[in-house]
Amino acid sequence: MIIALNFDMSKESTTLGKEGETIAVDHLIEKGYEILERNFRSQQGEIDIIAKENGFLVFVEVKMYSIGSYGTPLGAIRKPKKESMIHAARTYLLKNNIKNTNCRFDVLAIYRSWKGLSSFDLIKDAFHVS
Amino acid sequence: MLVKVNSAAISGLDGFIVEVEVDSIRGLPGQSIVGLPDAAVKESRDRVKFAITNSGFEFPPGYFTINLAPADIRKEGPMYDLPIAIGMLASSEQISTGKLSETVILGELSLDGGLRPVNGVLPMCMSINGNGIKRVIVPMENADEAALVSEVEVISCENLLEAANFLNGKISKKPHVIDIKALFSSRASYDIDFSDVKGQGHAKRALEVASAGGHNILMVGSPGSGKTMLARRLPTILPPLSINEALDVTKLYSITGLLSSKKSLITERPFRSPHHTTSDIGIIGGGRIPRPGEVSLAHMGILFLDEFSEFERKVLEVLRQPLEDGVVTIARAMSSVTFPAEFMLVAAMNPCPCGNYMDPTKTCTCPSFKVQRYWGKLSGPLLDRIDLHVEVPRLKKEELSEAPKGETSAEIRGRVDKARQRQIERLKGLKVNCNARMLPKHVREFCKLEPDAENLLKSAIMHLKMSGRSYDRILKVSRTIADLEGSENIKSNHIAEAIQYRSMDREK
């Protein structure tokens, strides 16, 4: 399917992303996540949402998809993104002096339909440090 | 929690115990494998992850370090999948650790949690004897092979879940047992038989002598005269393997992965016939981590080199040392390994490039320098090491159509078996098992000549200008001929027959 995008792409992406994160937070809270921080940044990385769930400290990456966009959420998490998240996660653990806690990386994919309805795909333990 | 799981590895031909230590800390999720793992071991991380989740277990959180001790020996192959998975499950308390210290675990995992067979189970099981190990858990396909070692209990499992349930005491499994004697009781039946070959009584007799004493033999003859046919029928008249010999051969096949899951013990002497394009490494063995070559795979059996003079000279010359010593030592940067290589060399070649040299009916079209070059490939020292040289002439028309059926393999085998039995009794406790492998001092001790035989040998040596090695080889061959006849001492007719098998020495 071809979609004509005749307005400013970068602006559209940011708003889509911001909007997505708000929807994501709502969804995660609904799923029992306790949100600790949003948009945590380290020198070389960032994490969209940091939350607590079931004893785990969870680092969540939110991926927003409108219908017709390419790829799958896991395909979008490539090595640089992984490394950025791992770096940020390490910084967060160090800054807050968190030890002896099991951590997890989750990916939350949000699919937007034309009518503005969203469906979610929460991938728990999406990747490991290698 | 720190968990130790026992596994095993192979270095050369011997196994040793590898301790798989698994521990985890809470933190970012991940696993690292240390202790000199090769690519297949590193990849086990991914297989283990899916095998664990697909078997209905929970993949444990935290950062895992898996250490394969001793850490200074390279670990290769996928046999650590199962011990790593069990270690991770035990570390996260999904498996009880009670039985782990007395159990060795081997096996490759598939993504669905099923177990796949691994190489080298027999030598690994042989090495774990003692060490406080009571049992070994192996994949189903390796169970027969592992059960050849009767000192350890063999538990065969189909998948990770079954192994976990066994370790948890949820199910009890009977140790897998195998009747080694029964494996030996039935001898293989062959579709081919010596009676298929018409004529060639002389060559058949030479092959009978060769297989009775384990001597090397070279057959020279024009194309289509039946050299290959004769050689292929050689396994049908070879004496049986003893249990210890069979285990040695099986060990070699186990580490090279040539053992089929249906036939756990090799009870027949191996017959290897590598093509003449085979490299010297292929023949002798080698590689970064040394693997046995054709000479070792033919251990206790036959190495048949068809078109002998078509092999590269380099390849033929590397045969010299194993022919003499019965072992090959392969040294590489990684390690130095000694493989056994007590084989019987059976070589076949044409007398010249066109194949008609010395043929009574056809004329040879080769210029003499070509014939010389053809024979030049075979060095003196190599020919010296071949005890029997025999010509296989083209059959005449009337022989082809009328020749009476020769002896069957079973008849010849009866004589060969008896002759070999005599040798085994005579050489009991000497580490050698056939006449061809006798050391010089054994030759002096056991090859007693009658006076006229001694005279004959002396004059033959003088007239035919034979080397010291030839002298020894003639004595060994005549000892075998005497054994075939059931004679205690070597008589002149035995010596005479042995001398006429050295035709290449005479021609030079």
Image (cartoon, coloured by chain):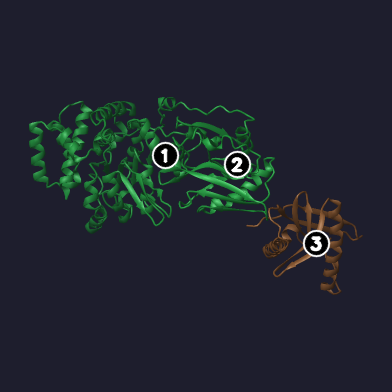
Chain colours: A brown, B green
Q: Which residue is mark 1?
A: B251
Q: Which residue is mark 3?
A: A37
* Callout 3 amino acid: Glu
* Residue B229 seen: yes
In the image, what residue occupies the spot 55% across and 43% down? B4
Compare residues B4 and B276 and report the one nearer the observer: B4
- Find residue B360 and report its horizontal and vertical position in percent: 22, 44
Question: Are callouts 3 and 1 both on one chain?
Answer: no
- Find residue B167 and report its horizontal and vertical position in percent: 60, 34
Q: Quadrant of the N terminus of chain B?
A: top right
**Secondary structure beneath label 1:** helix
Q: Are marks 2 and 1 in contact (CB under 8 Å)?
A: no
Q: Residues within 10 Å of mark 1 (few under 14, many from 20)?
A: many
- Find residue B391 and report its horizontal and vertical position in percent: 24, 42
* Callout 1 amino acid: Lys
User: From this viewpoint, which residue is outermost toward the front?
Assistant: A97
Which callout, 2 or 1, points to the residue nearer the camera? 2
In the image, what residue occupies the spot 16% across and 34% down? B445
Q: Residues within 10 Å of mark 2 (few under 14, many from 20)?
A: many
